[in-house]
Image (spheres, helix red, strand yellow):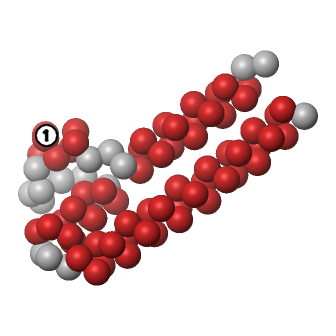
């Protein structure tokens, strides 16, 4: 009975993991010690080097990745309800 709730929580945590930005930015900034996160890469491309086209393309790639992973979770969620 808990399995569907765990899958929903996992979907939300996965989406949150992709968009983590504030904690690494607040701790280390954009220097060389910054962790290799997609959100940090998107920020550096878009706002520091002003490559907005590449930044928006990376944003769309992140969106497609989140949709693909979420659809897999939703498929398992629908199987769990049956």
What residue would you read off at disc 1? Answer: 27
Asked which quadrant contains residue 8, the reply is top right
Quadrant for the C terminus in the image: top right
Q: Position of residue 3 (x, y in %)?
A: 73, 26
Q: Residue visible at 72% across and 29% down?
A: 4
Q: Position of residue 14 (x, y in %)?
A: 50, 43
* Residue closest to the far top: 1
Quadrant location, the N terminus: top right
Residue 53, above or below 79: below
Q: Is residue 4 above or below residue 74?
A: above
| In this rendering, position of residue 34 left or right of residue 61 | left
Residues packed near mark 1 inside 10 Å, few (<14), some (14 to 19) or many (20 plus): few
Position in image of residue 49 (x %, y %) = 12, 75
Element type where label 1 sits in the image: helix
Tally of marks: 1
Q: Residue at x 72, y 20 (%)?
A: 2
Dividing the picture into quadrants, the one containing residue 57 is bottom left
Going by the image, does 19 lie left or right of 79? Answer: left
Q: Residue reaching furthest right?
A: 82
Q: Is residue 29 above or below residue 41?
A: above
Residue found at x 53% / y 56%:
66
- Snapshot quadrant of residue 78: top right
- As rendered, which of 36 and 56 lies closer to the eye? 56
Please tell me whether residue 24 is drawn above or below residue 30 in the rendered image: above
Q: Which residue is drawn at the image coordinates 23% and 76% (left, top)?
A: 52
């Amino acid at each position: 009975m808990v399995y569907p709730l765990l899958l929903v929580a996992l979907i939300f945590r996965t989406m949150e993991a992709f968009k983590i930005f504030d904690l690494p930015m607040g701790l280390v900034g954009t220097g060389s010690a910054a962790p290799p996160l997609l959100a940090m890469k998107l920020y550096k491309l878009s706002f520091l080097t002003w490559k907005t086209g590449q930044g928006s393309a990376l944003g769309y790639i992140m969106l497609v990745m989140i949709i693909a992973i979420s659809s897999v979770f939703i498929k398992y969620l629908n199987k769990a309800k049956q």
